């Protein structure tokens, strides 16, 4: 497209979820409550892992990383979502949009890799229990954690660099509540074939490879559990990874549907609804699943709470 005589767009306008005011206010209240609960739940898990020495093992160090990730993952998009529910016009600069795109997909890629690493950790713990402490030492755990973050932030760099060189000449309305890939490509007046293909390839490789690694780990875990002699041992062993498997199922179910598809016409209404699940709902589901279904976390919470109550009582008695 010839862009020499067209005005460059310097900012975009989010359309969000259209509707009458009372409906948007209702959505605002729901999204705000879920967002705050997500922040509190994930912060609580990080706090417990740091405060309780019994949780300072590879499994819970990975969980602490996941909770820290979820805080920033949801914070990258939800504030703009809340803004679109109350304001008629919500804007973002082109550079700010590209920055949001990069951090959102970096967090998403990091989560995919981290979930695969957590599945591998459970595989070692269940399938090689005698060698687990050697194969997954604290040092190795920290290296895996760092590798997940580094890999996650490298993966979206190539498409982000290409997007930063696109021209935007109008229209400037993004039919979404954050700078997702398809809405950005739709607004560009440049040829987007290369960046769409590269973005699709990078996204598919990260999602599908981490998903396959995760499922492979659980395949070996299931085989090992089936070989156990008693049902009680099978149930106890499976319970150690049931929470993680639930999180994996919810997260991958939504992002594979949303992103593992070739460049094509995109239904933005369906895309926005699905985005709510992995941007808003999933970050809350994670701490709920790991706290409600995990005895170690519940025990640690009661211990930390008891210590805090005892400390508070002692201080009040001194006063």
Image (spheres, helix red, strand yellow):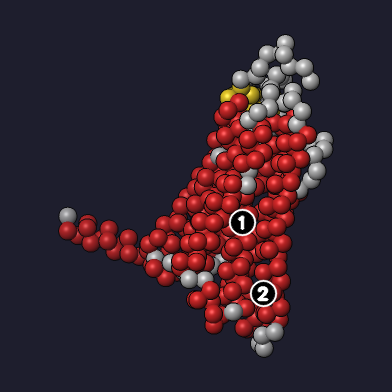
Q: Which residue is pictured at 32% across the width and 60% down the height?
A: 308
Q: Quadrant of the C terminus?
A: bottom left
Q: Report helix, strand or loop for mark 1.
A: helix
Q: Is residue 294 left or right of residue 276?
A: left
Image spot of residue 306 (x, y percent): 35, 65
> How far is disc 1 from disc 2 in space, using C-alphas?
19 Å
Q: Report the residue at 70% width, 84% height from top.
A: 227
Element type at marker 2? helix
Q: Are marks 1 and 2 in contact (CB under 8 Å)?
A: no
Q: Which mark is residue 221?
A: 2
Q: Quadrant of the N terminus?
A: top right
- Examine the image and state in which quarter residue 8 appears: top right
Residue, disc 1: 113
Point 62% across, 83% down: residue: 233
Question: Where 149 sits versus 29, above or below?
Answer: below
**Comes first in the chain, label 1 or label 2:** 1
Report the number of discs: 2
Q: Is residue 113 left or right of residue 301?
A: right
267 or 96, which is in the foreground? Answer: 96
Numbered label attached to residue 21? none
């Amino acid at each position: 497209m010839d862009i020499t005589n067209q005005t460059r767009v310097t900012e975009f306008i989010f359309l969000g979820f259209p509707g009458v005011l009372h409906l948007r206010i209702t959505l605002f209240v729901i999204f705000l409550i879920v967002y705050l609960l997500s922040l509190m739940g994930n912060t609580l898990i990080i706090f417990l892992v740091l405060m309780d020495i019994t949780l300072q093992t590879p499994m819970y160090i990975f969980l602490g990383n996941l909770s820290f990730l979820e805080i920033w993952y949801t914070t990258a998009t939800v504030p703009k979502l809340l803004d679109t529910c109350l304001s008629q016009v919500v804007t973002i600069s082109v550079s700010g949009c590209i920055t949001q795109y990069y951090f959102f997909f970096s967090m998403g890629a990091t989560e995919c890799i981290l979930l695969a690493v957590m599945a591998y950790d459970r595989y070692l713990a269940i399938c090689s229990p005698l060698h687990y402490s050697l194969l997954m030492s604290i040092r190795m755990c920290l290296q895996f954690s760092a590798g997940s973050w580094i890999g996650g932030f490298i993966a979206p760099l190539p498409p982000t660099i290409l997007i930063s060189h696109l021209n935007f000449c109008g229209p400037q309305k993004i039919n979404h509540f954050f700078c997702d890939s398809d809405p950005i490509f739709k607004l560009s007046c440049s040829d987007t074939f290369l960046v769409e293909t590269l973005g699709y390839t990078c996204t598919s490789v990260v999602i599908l490879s981490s998903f396959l690694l995760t499922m492979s780990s659980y395949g070996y875990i299931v085989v090992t559990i089936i070989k156990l002699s008693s049902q009680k041992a099978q149930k106890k062993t499976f319970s150690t990874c049931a929470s993680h498997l639930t999180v994996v199922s919810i997260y991958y179910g939504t992002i594979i549907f949303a992103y593992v598809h070739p460049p094509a016409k995109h239904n933005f209404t369906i895309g926005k609804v699905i985005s709510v699940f992995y941007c808003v709902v999933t970050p809350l589901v994670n701490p709920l699943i790991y706290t409600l279904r995990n005895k170690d976390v519940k025990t640690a919470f009661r211990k930390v709470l008891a210590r805090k109550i005892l400390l508070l009582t002692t201080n009040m008695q001194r006063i």
